[in-house]
Amino acid sequence: MSEFTVLNVTVILLDDGYASTALMPIEVFHSAGTLWRELRGEAPEPRFRVTTASIDGKPVRSPYAGLSMSPETSVAAIDRTDIAIIPTSGLCFNEKLIENNALLPWLQKQHAHGAYLAGVCMGAAYLAEAGLLDGRQATTHWAIAEEFRKRWTKVDWRPDMFVTEDARLLCSGGLTAAADVSLY
């Protein structure tokens, strides 16, 4: 067995979002160091410990997929993480930012402690609303980029890019870009 540090990954589950933007990162990080080795008949060496969390620890729903997802815990119960994934949380981002505003100080705290934060599609709005993207490059889905530019004027929005990274803050474009930012 090789020597390495297992990193803690927290995937936030948010109501009314696309389940795939949470499920893809869960599967990518869960499989890293395990799937290939198991297919070759070797002992798995997980690289990441994946935890799912919702704002209040209660299940969330994804109306687009007709799914309900049950998190392992609440964000408040997670003191520190190495990587946090913030999926999309519905198309009415103004209402969702208000509904999920308890996430903002948690994101600020995690980033201050050295965590990498990744916003998928509309998930980038939480990073912007927390002030973390001010003066930095970020991306989101091209269809909402202009609204984001108007609201968060200090962010250098780059919807022409699938993935951006700036000071441990990663953003990705649309839904399937959840896989891109996770693999990155």
Image (spheres, rainbow, N blue to C red):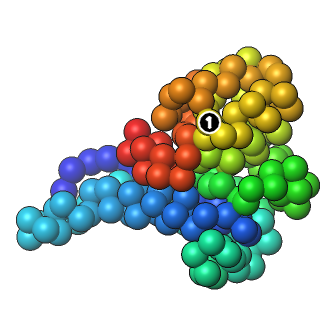
- The percent coordinates of residue 94 (x first, y second) are 87, 50
**Residue 31 lies in quadrant:** bottom left
Give the secondary structure at mark 1: helix
Q: Amino acid at mark 1?
A: Trp
Q: Residue furthest left?
A: 40
- The percent coordinates of residue 176 (x first, y second) are 47, 52
Q: Residue at x 59, y 30 (%)?
A: 159
Q: Quadrant of the C terminus?
A: top left
Foreground residue among 29 and 14 = 14
Residue 55 position (above or below residue 109):
below
Q: Residue at x 47, y 57 (%)?
A: 25
Q: Residue at x 16, y 62 (%)?
A: 37
Q: Where is mark 1, residue-wise?
A: 142
- The answer to whether residue 31 is visible is yes
- The answer to whether residue 78 is visible is no
Q: Residue at x 38, y 45 (%)?
A: 183
Residue 164 position (above or below residue 177):
above
Q: Quadrant of the N terminus?
A: bottom left
Badge 1: how crowded within 10 Å, few (<14), some, or many (20+)? some
